[in-house]
Each structure stands twice: as structure tokens, then as C-alpha cells.
Image (cartoon, coloured by chain):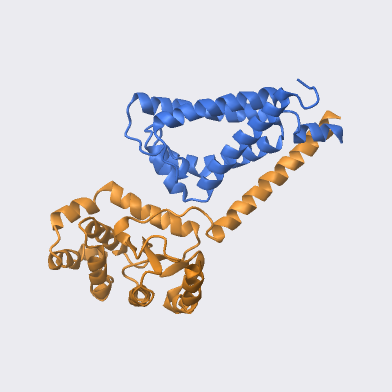
Amino acid sequence: MTDRKNARLLALAALLIFASTVAVLLARQFSLGPVRPAPDFRVFGPAGAPVQIYEYTDFACPACRHAAGKLEELLKVFDGGIQVHFKHYPLLNIHPWSLHAAAYADCAGAQGKFKEYAGLLFEGQAKWGPARVEAGEPKEFGEYAAKLGLDWQAMLACANDPETLKTLRLDIAEADLKGVNATPTFFINGKRAVGSGQLIDQARKFENILRKAAKP
Amino acid sequence: MTGKGGLKDLIGLLSRLALGGVFIYSGGIKALSPAEEFAYAIESYKVVNAQLSLYAAYAVPWIELWAGLLLAAGVFTRLNALFIGGMLVFFELLLGQAWLRKLPITSCGCFGSSGGNSIEAEFLQNLVLLALAWAAWRYGSRWSADEYAATL
């Protein structure tokens, strides 16, 4: 009798464990998990905007450069209706300097010039992106800082701070968990879009979303 | 204790559901977040190294989720309540040593990055959870899968 009872309970336990595991894994795939906020300097547009875009980007990726321009246009066109959260996803296997670029961009952000520094990184990606590792760190990182009047020594110290690296690693881990494997990847109100083509495709619905949000 | 729906049985059921719910939430929210996030929180207690913290961060959320679910459903209730109680005692030791050492921990990591209670608040909260674990262990067998399985 006790054996049969325990067998039933074990079967129920296995069922509950299996069902909850599948539910969590599915929730991960559909990005239903909590969203880790990006630092303020990496968030553009008003808080609580009806369209929330999370962008996973690599500074050395040409498609990301193209998409950055498109996002800038969308922010202007749907002024006040969109909030963009910039997340780093450096593809380290093909872009060896992307992590450095992301760190410097965040450190420029700490000095109030993330957007400007990111713009220069995208603009000059053909110069520093393919630079050989043996040749040492590309000089462009320092040049962009000088161009923007940033404190380069402070940026170097910041880029070597474990906290900076921790923030970047968390962005990467979060992207991995969401199944991001290409850049740029966007999550627009939770819906995935890869590349600027899919971004523009989804942007066609923004008008509707904004209209619905404006209804009392 | 085994009267028809006595107050103690009700307390047992509510304790089981409340404690199970807290563990389902805390495990689920962490299982849905990058393990590295929880690993950094574990590291900040300065008890285990980075590698072990990461292993723990992969395992603990799932254990919390499953244990919470089984307790709420009343599967092997007493054993589960004991197991969860053991986990809570372990968490209390971690929190207590951090409190005594005055470690600069801003978020205990108990509920992922979303929760940001102080160490002291979490320590006291865990004491309440421990009381619930005791009530679930002592009175939580009514209206449970255990009871239902015995009647089949």
C-alpha cells in the first residue's frame, strides 16, 4: 500500500518537475523573463513609451551600424512614442575588439557621451574592427575620446574596472538566454526582430500601437 | 491535528502555499534570468569562488522552483518542508556571516536582480519563512497530494 502511494507521489513529482521545467524553458524562448535595465546613458526616449525596443548590438558589425541609423530615424519619426534600450552583444569570435569598444562606449557614457562615442565607433568600424590582435589595441579608441574631449585616462581606468566588464558580461549572458545569435537583434514589445529589415517591418505597426496607447 | 479542517490544518495549508509560492517565485524569476546575474550575487558573499558561484547559480534556482512546487502541491510534504527549512537555514548562515562581516552587499540576490532588500531585512524575512517551513512540516499534510494518494 505504502509502495503504491509512494510510486504515485513520485510520478506526480516527476510530472510537476517536468512541466515546470518545460514552462520555464519556453518562457525563456519567448523572452518572458524579467528585463534587466540598461544603464541610463544607454536608454533613449521617454520612460513608459508604448513601444519598448531592446537592441542587442556589436559595434564592429556593419548591419548594426546600418540599424543604428534606422533606429535614430524611428526615434525622430515616432518622437516620444519609442524608448530604446541599448544592450551590448559583442561577437567575440569574429570581432576581437568589440568587447573593448563596448567597454569604452560605456565609459564614455559615464562621462555623458555614450551616444556620441557609439556614433564614432560605428562610423569608424571598418578601421578598428578588423585590426589584428597582435598589433595591439586600435588607436582609434583613444582618438575618438580625444575628439569628444573625454578624459582618456579615466576611460582606461573605467574600462579595466571589473564592474564594467561585469555589466558587459551580464548583457551577453542575457542575450544568450534569449537565444540571440546574430546582431543586431531587437525585442520590440517582446517580439523578436533580427536585422534592420525586420525592424522596419515591425515599425509599420508602431502607428497602430501608438494610436491604441493614446486612446483613453 | 487530523480533525476535519481544524485551524491547525488550515495554518498548515496556508504555510505550505505561502512558502511554496515564495520558492516558486524566487526560483522561477532566477531561472528566467542569466545565471551570471545570480552568480555575481553569490560571489558578493565571499564564501565561494567565481566558478563555484556560477555552478550554484545554475542549480539553485531550479531546486528552489521544484521544491516550492512540490511543497505547494503537498508531495512528500514533510520531507519537502524539511528540505526547504534546511535551505533556509543555509541561506541564514550566508546572510548572517555577510551581516557580521559588514560586506557591502546591495542586493542579496534572493529574488534575482529585481529584488533589492537589505541583508538585515532578508535575514528577518527568512526567519518568517523558517516559521512557515515549521508549520508546513508540522501541520501541512491535510489537503495535500500525500493525503489524496493515500486514499486512492
Residue A142, x across and y down, in percent: 16, 63
Relative to B16, is A197 on the left or the right? left
Residue A96, x across and y down, in percent: 31, 64
Q: Quadrant of the N terminus of chain A?
A: top right
| The color chain A is rendered in | orange
Q: Nearer the viewer, residue A165 or A74?
A: A74
Relative to B72, is A164 on the left or the right? left
Residue B134 visible (yes or no): yes
Is residue B112 positioned above or below A118 on the image?
Answer: above
Q: Residue at x 79, y 37 (%)?
A: A7
Q: Residue at x 16, y 64 (%)?
A: A145
Residue A146, x across and y down, in percent: 13, 65
Q: Residue at x 31, y 56 (%)?
A: A40
Relative to B11, is B4 on the left or the right? right
* Chain coloured blue in the rendered structure: B
Given the current orientation, which residue lies at the most extreme front position? A216
Residue B117, x across and y down, in percent: 42, 37
Is residue A198 positioned above or below B40 on the image?
Answer: below
Q: Nearer the viewer, residue A97 or A123?
A: A123
Given the current orientation, which residue lies at the most extreme top position? B1
